[in-house]
Image (cartoon, grey):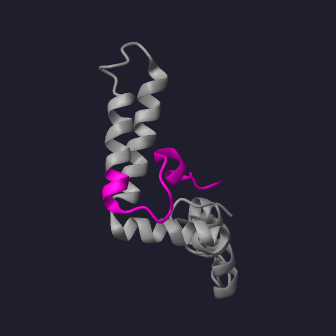
Amino acid sequence: MTVKDYYRLLGVGRESTDEEIKKAYRKLAMMYHPDRNAGDPDCEDHLKEINEAYQVLGDQEKRRQYDFLRRQPLRGRAFYEGDPSNELFSILRAFARGGFPRRSQGGCGGRGFGRRGCRRWNRNF
């Protein structure tokens, strides 16, 4: 999974100010607005990408996190929600704790067989 280059999408440099980002966003939003390009679905998709880029670069905190992610992509992505590597960490964590949690054992309602066994199974024998 690669990170989109929002700076390139808006056509601004990495050192650009908030005013320059806002000006570039407004220019592109007017250019790709669906009312100006009736019947062109590509313009609508492009406008969504431009809005996403402005939502990230327009907010100082999100922009800082985005810049950090761009500099160190593997280190920054490892713990984001929805990342497939989270599943790997949960599996490794389960083995470190001694195994996976118990789930329903068929007819025993989640109880283990232990010394006495499952009462439901003992009735049938």
Along the line of sight, the residue nearer the viewer: 34 or 125? 34
Residue 55 in picture, x, y percent from top left: 35, 53
Compared with residue 104, is residue 36 higher up or lower down, i.e. above or below? above
Along the line of sight, the residue nearer the viewer: 11 or 70? 11
For the record, the magenta segment spans 1-22
Residue 18 in picture, x, y percent from top left: 33, 61
Compared with residue 59, is residue 28 higher up or lower down, i.e. above or below? above
Placement of the N terminus among the 4 image quadrants = bottom right
Q: Residue at 69%, 78% (x, y): give it.
A: 92
Q: Is residue 21 magenta?
A: yes
Residue 45 in picture, x, y percent from top left: 46, 31
Q: Is residue 72 magenta?
A: no
Camera sees residue 122: no
Along the line of sight, the residue nearer the viewer: 92 or 82? 82
Along the line of sight, the residue nearer the viewer: 48 or 23? 23
Instruction: Say which quarter of the image contains residue 113.
Output: bottom right
How many marks do you count on the picture? Answer: 0
In this image, 66 relative to 48: left or right? right
Q: Residue at 64%, 82% (x, y): give it.
A: 114
Q: Residue at 30%, 57% (x, y): give it.
A: 19
Compared with residue 60, is residue 107 higher up or lower down, i.e. above or below? above
Placement of the C terminus among the 4 image quadrants = bottom right
Q: Residue at 38%, 46% (x, y): give it.
A: 24
Residue 108 in picture, x, y percent from top left: 57, 66
Compared with residue 23, is residue 75 higher up or lower down, i.e. above or below? below
Q: Residue furthest top?
A: 39
Camera sees residue 9: yes
In this image, 14 relative to 38: left or right? right
